[in-house]
Amino acid sequence: MEVATRRSQRKKRRRFWFRFTFRSTMVIAILSVLALLCIFSYSYLLGPPPMQVAQSTYIYDDDGNVVNETQQGHQRNWTNIDDVSPFVLDAFVAIEDRKFYDHHGFDYMRIGAAVLKNVQTMSRSQGASTITQQYARNLFLNHEKTWDRKAREALYALRLEWHVPKDDILEGYVNTINFGHGAYGIERAAHLYFGVSAKELSLEQAALLAGLPRGPSYYSPYNHPERAKDRQELILLR
């Protein structure tokens, strides 16, 4: 009789903990969904973020020759996406964000893999930022690896995805990237490294430039030509 009573009590405890765990999980899931809906609604109501960036200013003489240039620390010329070689756009999508035209600002598979890797290594070294997130970071934020910066980056990325067409995001992205040696934006990079316009870049040139933002100094073809070549070959394979 006593054995049967103990078995009954154990069964009751198991049922209690099962129900408690199930209900707690459901409550957490519902609250998480509500929180996400609030975040999405908030980002939508905020509208598109301001997207002006500092550009170089040129002073011309009467004959149309450049006699001086002023810039706020960044040598940058904004270039319309139609004036950028399609090889450049393909290269960046291939190496930085292959699902760019399919996702809504975040690649959840990559994020999950990065979180798992970071937990395993006890660091924040592994990133999974999409082109939209990187553009948001270039416009509004610094490159510190903190949770606060990541949260604000996500909010800006949502606002971009809600209100800005994909091609405009890609255009802004290639115009705000740091390519190293003081060159910001694809037009400056094309002139600096190859002496051509962004529209004239070949496949091989585009692949080399697409490899620079991961580490402008580390992959610089001037400072580390072998690293730059290896990165270029990786992008060509992609």
Image (spheres, rainbow, N blue to C red):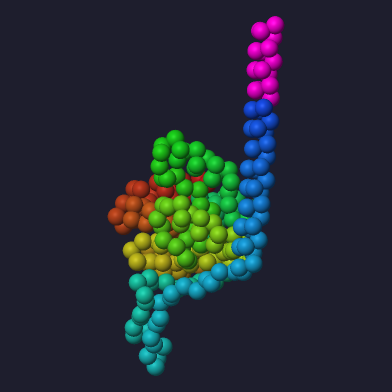
Query: Taking 159 as reference, is 178 left or right?
Result: left
Q: Is residue 135 magenta?
A: no
Q: Is residue 103 visible?
A: no
Tell which of 181 and 161 is nearer to you.
161
- Type of secondary structure dominating the magenta stretch: helix
Give residue 169's position: percent from left, percent from top.
Answer: 57, 64
Q: Is residue 32 visible?
A: yes
- The residue located at (61%, 68%) in the rendering is 46
Q: Which residues make up the magenta segment? A: 1-15
Quadrant (top left, top right, bottom left, bottom right) of the N terminus = top right
Tell which of 18 and 149 is nearer to you.
18
Give residue 21's position: percent from left, percent from top.
Answer: 64, 32
Residue that extends furthest to the front in the rendered view of this protein = 2
- The residue located at (66%, 17%) in the rendering is 9
Vertical order, 103 against 6 (above or below): below
Tell which of 39 and 9 is nearer to you.
9
Residue that extends furthest to the left in the rendered view of this protein = 223
Tell which of 199 and 186 is nearer to you.
186
Give residue 19's position: percent from left, percent from top.
Answer: 68, 30
- The residue located at (38%, 72%) in the rendering is 75
Give residue 168's position: percent from left, percent from top.
Answer: 59, 67
